[in-house]
């Protein structure tokens, strides 16, 4: 080997040797960017997701509150049950049921109401009708055909 080649090799050795020594002195012994332990990262993500789901689940179990009325089921429509109007006023009570609807008894008589018109909320059964409107429907249902 000639002197130029030896000098070139020595220069490269010093250059790369100095970089390694400098990196160690500067605390560069950690993992290179993008070379994290994927299993540890996945475990961390699973723990975060599990905690999130636990908190959301805890909120779902609190109170079971309904925000408003929901549709009543046939099982909710029982004879003797009070029926309220949309303002919470008592309109009447369920007298009976048949395949075409629910008979609601009120002070002015009885009227047939479709099953799907009933809802329920924290106060019980209701229909989306005011007292005046309901009383008019009862009066019309109980008017004599002769006038």
Image: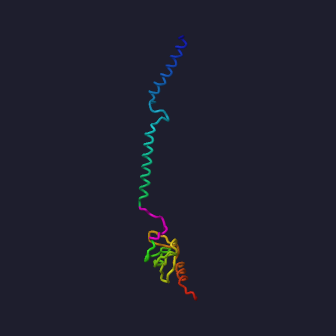
The image shows a total of numbered marks equal to 0
Reply yes or no: does residue 86 show up in magenta: no
| Horizontal arrangement in the rendering, residue 50 relative to residue 129 (left or right) | left
**Front-most of residues 98 and 110:** 98
Q: Main secondary structure of the magenta part?
A: loop
**Front-most of residues 83 and 86:** 83
- In the rendered image, residue 123, in percent from the top left (x then y), is placed at 44, 71
Q: Residue at the location (44% across, 30% down)?
A: 29
Q: Is residue 83 visible?
A: yes
Q: Residue at the location (49% across, 34% down)?
A: 33
Quadrant for the C terminus in the image: bottom right
**Front-most of residues 47 and 21:** 47
**Front-most of residues 89 and 121:** 121
Where are the magenta residues, as a range?
63-75
Q: Residue at the location (54% across, 16% down)?
A: 8
Report the residue that reaches farthest toward the bottom.
146
Reply yes or no: does residue 73 show up in magenta: yes
- In the rendered image, residue 87, in percent from the top left (x then y), is placed at 50, 73
- In the rendered image, residue 10, in percent from the top left (x then y), is placed at 50, 16
Is residue 30 depicted above or below 139 in this figure? above
């Amino acid at each position: 080997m000639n002197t130029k080649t030896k000098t070139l090799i020595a220069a490269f050795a010093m250059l790369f040797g100095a970089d390694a020594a400098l990196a160690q002195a500067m605390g560069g012994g950690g993992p290179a960017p993008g070379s994290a332990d994927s299993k540890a990262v996945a475990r961390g993500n699973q723990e975060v997701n599990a905690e999130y789901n636990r908190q959301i689940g805890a909120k779902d179990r609190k109170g079971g509150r309904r925000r408003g009325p929901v549709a009543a089921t046939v099982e909710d429509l029982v004879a003797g049950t009070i029926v309220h109007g949309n303002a919470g006023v008592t309109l009447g009570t369920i007298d009976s049921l048949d395949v075409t609807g629910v008979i609601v008894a009120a002070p002015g008589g009885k009227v047939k109401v479709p099953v799907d018109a009933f809802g329920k909320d924290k106060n019980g059964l209701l229909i989306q009708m005011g007292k005046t409107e309901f009383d008019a429907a009862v009066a019309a249902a109980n008017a004599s055909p002769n006038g």
